[in-house]
Image: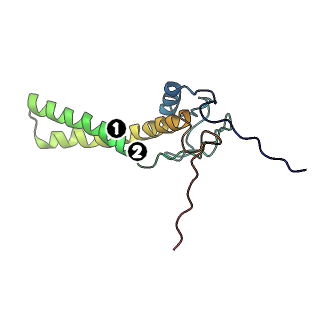
């Protein structure tokens, strides 16, 4: 007897996932599904599955978005600070270098995993890139040469 897999219902019929909660859980670097398991097993390496609830997380495709958003945020903060400091106090250049270079690096390293986690949470909540069942986007095979 041949058994067929039962089709997964379309995305419109699946229960809605709370986008805000998924973004917050991702920001906290926890699993967007349960909020308790660690999202990463290295600095920016997303775990294949959640250690707490076994939700598959390998579907995520954050790619270049987290560094882009991090640069936009850090750039706005640092440039605004530089302009305000220069306009109000006008310190020597070495003060700017001593203040803004470490702040830029530190803020970037602090924000990057949080922004990436929020984007993974958003992908999970919107059932993008394989997080949604039968309506998954197939991953194309790399071209052969």
Near-viewer residue (30 or 140):
140
Residue 55 is situated, as x and y percent measured from the top left of the image, at: 65, 38
Q: Is mark 1 on a helix, strand or loop?
A: helix
Q: In this view, does 24 lie to the left or right of 17?
A: left
Where is residue 61? Give x, y as percent. Answer: 50, 47
* The image quarter in which residue 114 lies: top left
Judged from the image, the secondary structure of the residue bearing numbered disc 2 is: helix
User: Where is mark 1, residue-wise?
Assistant: 107
Q: Position of residue 38 (x, y in %)?
A: 58, 36
Q: How crowded is mark 2: few (under 14 residues within 10 Å), some or many (20 or more)?
A: few
Q: Can residue 89 be seen in this view?
A: no
Q: Mark 2 points at which residue?
A: 65
Task: Answer yes or no: is residue 59 visible.
Answer: yes
The image position of residue 77, as x and y in percent, is 26, 34
The reply, left or right, for residue 97 in relation to residue 36 is left
The foreground one among 91 and 18 is: 18
Image point 61% across, 31% down: which residue?
A: 33
Q: Which of marks 1 and 2 is nearer the N terminus?
A: 2
Which residue is painted at 58% across and 34% down in the image? 31
Please tell me which residue lies in front, 78 or 62.
62
Circle 1 residues within 10 Å: few <14, some 14–19, many ≥20: some
């Amino acid at each position: 007897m041949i058994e067929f897999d039962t089709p997964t219902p379309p995305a419109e019929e699946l229960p809605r996932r709370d986008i805000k909660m998924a973004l917050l859980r991702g920001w906290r670097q926890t699993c967007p599904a349960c909020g308790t398991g660690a999202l990463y097993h290295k600095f920016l390496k997303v775990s294949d599955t959640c250690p707490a609830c076994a939700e598959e997380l390998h579907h995520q495709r954050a790619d270049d978005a987290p560094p882009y958003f991090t640069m936009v945020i850090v750039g706005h903060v640092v440039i605004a600070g530089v302009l305000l400091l220069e306009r109000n106090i006008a310190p020597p250049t070495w003060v700017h270098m001593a203040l803004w270079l470490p702040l830029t690096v530190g803020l970037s390293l602090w924000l990057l995993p949080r922004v990436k986690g929020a984007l993974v949470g958003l992908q999970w909540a919107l059932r993008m890139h394989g997080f949604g069942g039968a309506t998954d986007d197939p991953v194309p095979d790399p071209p052969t040469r």
